[in-house]
Image (spheres, coloured by chain):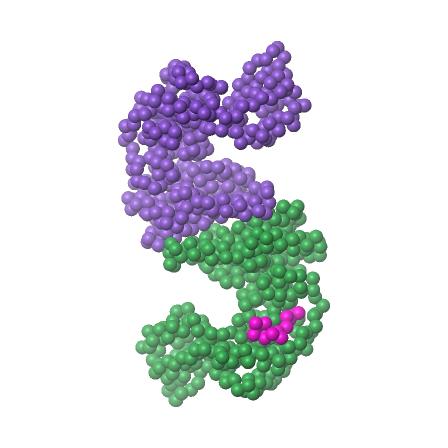
Chain colours: A green, B purple
Amino acid sequence: MGLIVQKFGGTSVGTIERILRVADRVISYKEAGHQMVVVVSAMGKSTDVLVDMAKQIAPHPSEREMDMLLSTGEQVSIALLTMALQQRGYAAVSLTGWQAGMITESVHGKARIKDIDNQRILRELQQNKIVIVAGFQGITEEGEITTLGRGGSDTTAVALAASLNAEKCEIFTDVAGVYTADPRVVPTAQKLPSISYDEMLELANLGAGVLHPRSVELAKKHQVKLVVRSSFTQEDGTYVEEVATMETGRVVSGVAHDEDIAKITVVGMPDRNGALSRLFNTLAEHQVNVDIIIQSSYDASATNISFTISADDLPKTLSTLEANRAKLQFEKVEHEEGLTKVSIVGAGMVNNPGVAAEMFKQLAEQEISIKMVSTSDIKVSCVIPASQTGLAVRTLHTAFGLDVAEEATVYGV
Amino acid sequence: MGLIVQKFGGTSVGTIERILRVADRVISYKEAGHQMVVVVSAMGKSTDVLVDMAKQIAPHPSEREMDMLLSTGEQVSIALLTMALQQRGYAAVSLTGWQAGMITESVHGKARIKDIDNQRILRELQQNKIVIVAGFQGITEEGEITTLGRGGSDTTAVALAASLNAEKCEIFTDVAGVYTADPRVVPTAQKLPSISYDEMLELANLGAGVLHPRSVELAKKHQVKLVVRSSFTQEDGTYVEEVATMETGRVVSGVAHDEDIAKITVVGMPDRNGALSRLFNTLAEHQVNVDIIIQSSYDASATNISFTISADDLPKTLSTLEANRAKLQFEKVEHEEGLTKVSIVGAGMVNNPGVAAEMFKQLAEQEISIKMVSTSDIKVSCVIPASQTGLAVRTLHTAFGLDVAEEATVYGV
């Protein structure tokens, strides 16, 4: 019976009653003989309340002070969960990010973990205590409180699991695992018993919100066995680990989709050295995240460049381009809204040529027009009209054999 | 223009609007050329909300986890006040207890400050920043979060003022200063322009709630010039400092009263060595705070011991005595409720014999019966029936010449 790191998100500790339920679950593992390290987020909407207070004072509060403010949220959760465990007669101790030794970069609002000084945690574990750690937060070498940004508590849990050599890292959330597609769009979507890090990473990046890409990357890097499962039921979740796909025959593991995509085409840019870098550096400086990029020649001296962005960023992107027209020297900018990116992901695609062709054929048969395509070793993404999202996702889900449940692998609690 | 430490209590930062008002006041001092260190408490009722959540989980949560929980309250306040200052264009930085170097004993819930490592604060002040420090909290040498217990934020402010050699320490509160008596009982009560540490200490101990005795003790020890004043008006407050009474001719500075006193008489205890110590040690072990103690002989072998306690502690005290009857070997216990302790305080009493006699005479003339008496160099306390509290306080206030305002001393902002 080894060490297990568990992470409970804000919804899972959103009320006193839920905190008590989390305590019961942690105790069941402790009783089974595990050493337990539990990472918790701030309670439900408490972060929103804090953000709202800050906004009443300053429209753009400093990031250092926001970290000071928001880090109180997890501190409340760890104290309450620890009290619940102690009340049930178990030795437990809460640790803030700095007490747990989560050393981060000197960046506020989205710091990355540099190192974990796990001496304190190990000392508490040796005393047979359940250790409750505040997620999402850390401390710089200068003693400043930092937060890790989106997906921060998942990252805390994975980093601790790596540092402590945990048997596994269980991420408890409000869904029961990783699905072959969004169950709201595809009623036949199946929960995957297991998935590889790379597939999970693609799915996370493609809009499947269960795990933040950062935590998956970290898990892959340190080979931390991840489990995604529901905090409200006892059912098995999805294992994320290196070997998963080796044991299954599937070519495609899931269909992801990301709505609210916009496509921009910059027409007639001079085809000189550095034109592309000038364009995308300008956009990056204005915090525009660009996804798929396609360059097509226009004539001997000019080029057209198309790229996709989140529809939310469209006004900012258009105004940035316009403001830099003199520098970028393009002829005109065209844009298209109401698009979706639909993607198939599967580690098995590497060894199965023709998967992309099959995807295009399936979409064509449904008369779905493909606006852009992007591929990697383990995924194919197509940009299509948003109105055809459901049809596309369901068609691909069926075509690649995902409507039927895969047999569970040997793992399970 | 020197360094000033200010402290704003929970009521003063109870809402966003009030935090903004505190920011304005701090800025007015900064603009006048002062270096500013500002200590704040948790916002209004936020501590109550946290305590309530804890009580839902555990009737007696561990003190370590309560400190972890409650210390978030001040952390929220310091972040918000700092944001408000920054929003108005002033350089400011918030520091938690541990960041501010408030080293305490390894005791939870009521730790005392052992040392202040003020390097960080000095560094921030050198960078011309307004430094906002979380009151009420500290850190042990082992890195545990502690809280200082009742009056903790006042203590933080005074300790910082001592450590930083501040020009003065201003305690902003919901009253305008220290009064000669409680204005709700004595309409002619006067705000004192100044008062000595010893007098303030007696008043604080006697139930005048403006300052906690700990902070006054600390101020006296380090000769920190204290000012008590209103956070809602601009009027001058009361200076608490060593020389105050030397400059005034008054004998009595104030009349204090503490309602809800109960008197216990333990009848017929064996008059052997150690009987008294056994009795009061037993009560102390059960957290009963005893105030006035009077011993009277009974016969050759036995003694009667009377003492006062807070009426709240009466059931606990009676049950503790009953449970230890075998050990203490008393004959019986009598008790009386509905009592008040009324006290006159004045450093001038040392050189004016007959003050106590005058007090007894004044009370006797009003036919107020005196149940117990306790004296020190600078105060006389009488326990009387609670029904006569108002009459007694007003009579003494007039008799000792407190109905007329004293002229302000040379100080003032």
- Please name whichever residue, A369 or B240, is drawn nearer the observer in this view of the structure: A369
Is residue B405 rendered magenta in the image? no
Q: Is A189 colored magenta in this rendering? A: yes
Q: Is residue A338 above or below residue A219?
A: below
A275 to the left or right of A362: left
Q: Quadrant of residue B393?
A: top left
Q: Is residue A105 visible?
A: no
The quarter of the picture where the C terminus of chain A appears is bottom right
Give the residue at x 66% y 61%. Answer: A234
Residue drawn at point x = 67 percent, y = 65 percent: A236
At horizontal 70% and vertical 70% (from top left) the residue drawn is A409
**Residue A34 position (above or below residue A373):** above
Q: Position of residue A370 (x, y in %)?
A: 50, 84
* Residue A277 in the image, given as x and y percentages of width and height: 41, 76
Residue most toward the top? Answer: B300
Left or right: residue A235 versus residue B234 is right
Asked whether the viewer can see residue B154, the reply is yes
Residue B397 lies in what quarter of the image? top left
- Looking at the picture, tell me which residue is in the foreground, B114 or B64: B64
Q: Residue at x 39, y 50 (%)?
A: B16
Q: Residue furthest bottom?
A: A299
Give how far across and how far down residue B162 sits, in percent: 40, 36
Q: How many marks?
A: 0
Front residue of A77/A304: it is A77
B94 is higher (above) or lower (below) than B376? below
Magenta-highlighted residues: A181-194
Q: Quadrant of the N terminus of chain A?
A: bottom right
Q: Magenta stretch mostly in which secondary structure?
A: loop
Q: Is residue A154 left or right of residue B199?
A: right
